[in-house]
Image (spheres, rainbow, N blue to C red):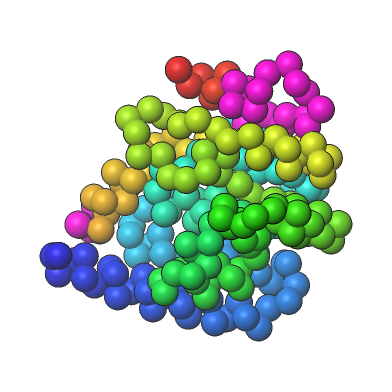
Amino acid sequence: MTFNKIKMAIYSIFLTNLYGFKLTKMKKSADKKRLRIEYAKKMLVKLNIDIKIINEDRMPLDGQYLLCSNHGTILDPLIIEIATQNSKIYGHWIAKKELYNSIFFGKFVRNGGSILLDREASQMSGFFKEIKECVKNGDSIYIFPEGTRNKTDKPISEFKDGSQIIAVKNKLPILPVYIRSKANEVLKSAIKDSKEHRTIEVEIGNIIDFKDRTLSLEENYKKQFCIT
């Protein structure tokens, strides 16, 4: 591991756990949103990465949605926070059990506004109940429909069925967001040398009615962002 990588790792662990602790003291959604954005900005400034938002005018200023984004890097939640920073939308992230138990991310994930997805659980009723409670309280849900990071050469991997089920069960319009840049490659190069300025492009799509079954969510997403 290079010296730059060690420095970045130490800084990331410190900042993530610092904000994880700060989030334990926040009860209101607006306060958690503010801290999540603050954290995202500090991390991206350290990496010298800017987020360029395409079709920002499509981002709703308020309301409740199922925000769906592609997922290729650990930076993706930070990118989404920046993309939604000028909106009052606050979303609970669907987070895997591994993240909840992570020494690195655990404190932040558990306290930052998230819903645990345990794929090993014998039943999913508790998971869907927690989503319903969050929606009842006026919040949105943020999810990566691919289920895990896409490590293939394709722009996106196959979407899981759960996203569309969540939207229908909770009557949530779907807000598609597409991280156009190869964010994982940008992150790797930024960790090696953060002196060079880099940009990640993220595009906001058109809202999809949860009742629209003309196309599957994956097909609609691909069509909107011209993904082949």
- The answer to which image quadrant residue 32 occupies is bottom right
Q: Residue furthest front?
A: 122
Q: Nearer the viewer, residue 189 or 222?
A: 222
Q: Nearer the viewer, residue 98 or 30?
A: 98
Q: Is residue 89 visible?
A: no
- The answer to which image quadrant residue 209 occupies is top right
Horizontal side of residue 10 vs 146, given as left or right: left
Pick the quarter of the image with the C terminus. Answer: top left
Q: Residue furthest left?
A: 2
| Residue 164 percent across, percent down from the top left | 70, 35
Q: Is residue 137 above or below residue 64?
A: below
| Residue 79 percent across, percent down from the top left | 49, 50
At 65% from the left edge and 60% from the top edge, which residue is drawn? Answer: 115
Instruction: Tell me which segment is drawn in magenta.
Output: 192-221
193 inside magenta stretch? yes
Horizontal side of residue 119 vs 33, given as left or right: left
Q: Is residue 8 visible?
A: yes
Q: Nearer the viewer, residue 15 or 149?
A: 149
Q: Nearer the viewer, residue 87 or 4?
A: 4
Q: Is residue 12 above or below residue 75?
A: below
41 inside magenta stretch? no
At 62% from the left edge and 31% from the top edge, which residue is drawn? Answer: 205
At 32% from the left edge and 30% from the top edge, which residue is drawn? Answer: 153
Q: Is residue 178 above or below residue 26?
A: above
